[in-house]
Amino acid sequence: MKKIKLLFIALILLGSCKNIDFGDINKDPIGPNEPSPKDMLAGGIMNFFNNGGRDYLSNPTFYIQWQTQNIYTSEMQYADAPIDWDPWYVQVLSNFKKNIEYIEENRNSSIVKSMGDPDNQIGVNKIMMAYVFKFITDIYGDIPFSEALNPDNPTPKYENQIEIYHGIINMLKEARDMIDPAKGGIQGDIVYNGDVSKWQKLANSLIMHAALQLSKVQSEKNYATAEFNNALNHSAGVIENLDDEAWIYYTHMDRRMQNPYSRFRRDDYFLAKEFTDALQGEDKINNPVTSCSPSYNHTQDYREYIFSNSPGDDGRNYSCSVEGDGVKMSGLIWNPDAPLPFFTASWVYLDRAEAAARGWTSENFDELLTNAIVKSYESLASHYDPSNLSVYQSLATNFAAARVADANNPSYANANNPKEAKLHVIGEEKWVAYFPMGFEAWAQWRRIGYPALTPHPEPLNATGQIPRRYTYPSSESTLNPQGYATGVQDLTPAEDRNDSRIPWDK
């Protein structure tokens, strides 16, 4: 009897291998049955800028001493633990890649055409892909790049970071050149509201930014200089004005798109004393030039009034790098509705000023640094304190003049040579202008080396140095051992630690 039952079950199982048409049983009767290019673009951008975990948003603010922790302090003390990259590969990059493939395969369909010129749509998706790849490689070093995002290849190769940078710059150029503003705007663009000419300016600005990030790699100087100048002089232009800036706008009405800082328990964080001391400069109450910021000793930086909820209040005596200044990030920024910068005119002018200081261009350094500081004041005020914009504009002019004087003083901060003095000021100004976008500021600080920051006195990592990268995801050494080994080998030292240096940081 048992044999008959088993035979019967086996026949059923064998029969189940036949191709049977189940009709619409797997279709969602409510949701869309076709992908929506505009929703996939918007979703990819939202997923990238809406990651609010400590690993993804706050950790770099501790490394560059913008913020401190007062309860859970392991990140501030450089705890070395593997950090997962799935949110970027799975939830963001794959979104853009699938969208590009769908638009390409269906470029003549009414759905695709109704959302804008197919090439313009693909170009914007590619710019976002390039930016996210740069973000990931700046965190880890060597990563899967050309073989990434292929579901049929579970062990993609890790590519050398310098080669990845070449690929990123090529991707940005290709995307920029396939965009044609004459063919109209696109839908799903939550950054520029469909204005593709501004995406071209963003692409050129990102090319310059990426090229400059190779400045420590001697063998790349000619390549990086050429790519920087080609982008700077491209007919599509670069970001120069507030109207061209890329910002991400949030709203508390949509839980999927709230400012990620607002998800943290605010009582757990203070602004670091190094940062608030630097902003207060020589006008700091009762302490003209502090030990926390030995070189940032200029007049008061009035961006302090935007960054801090109680500027000028120095009635506390906390030690540097260990505890905060008793001051928190301003509610103007730490707010579910507050916007965050993606790429600003100030950042572009600072890149151009740095390139001029390095001799990459013949542009006027003083004018570029002045524009960078004034645009920083104006942009921050426009987005966070618009009612006082005219006040900040007046303050910015005087502060910029003081900073230009610092940069042209060869002995500034013991630099002892004109180029180094300029780079010192550029490093300090980038440190402030990038606030509160910690990952961008961390990448700039690792490369330029200014301002001089003292590591935490009670570190949890191997050498006690400020982290230079994130440790690879824990699964990589077992699931992709060959790729993992290649990535580790390109580190200095060749160990998967958060204080090892990535290729552009050597």
Image (cartoon, helix red, strand yellow):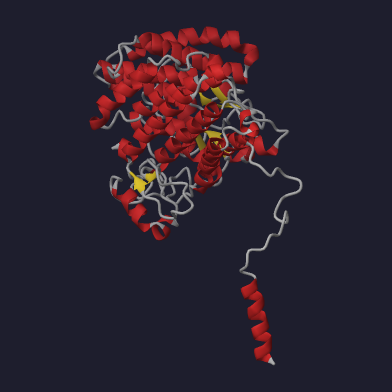
Residue nearest the observer in this picture, 206 or 391: 206
- The x and y percentages for residue 308 are 57, 25
In which quadrant of the rendered view does residue 358 lie?
top left
> Which quarter of the rendering shows the C terminus?
top left
Is residue 377 something that shows in the picture?
Answer: yes
When the figure is inspected, residue 97 is found, relative to residue 171, above or below; the finding is below
Residue nearest the observer in this picture, 222 or 283: 222
Left/right placement of residue 491 relative to residue 67 reads: left
Residue nearest the observer in this picture, 177 or 137: 177
Residue at the right extreme? 30
- The x and y percentages for residue 463 are 33, 47
In which quadrant of the rendered view does residue 32 lie?
top right
Residue drawn at 56 percent across, 15 percent down: 243
- The x and y percentages for residue 332 are 63, 25
When the figure is inspected, residue 80 is found, relative to residue 65, above or below; the finding is below
- The x and y percentages for residue 230 are 35, 19
Is residue 69 something that shows in the picture?
Answer: no
Residue drawn at 34 percent across, 9 percent down: 364
Residue at the bottom extreme? 1
> Which quarter of the rendering shows the N terminus?
bottom right
Residue drawn at 27 percent across, 17 percent down: 359
> Exactly how many numbered labels are in the figure?
0
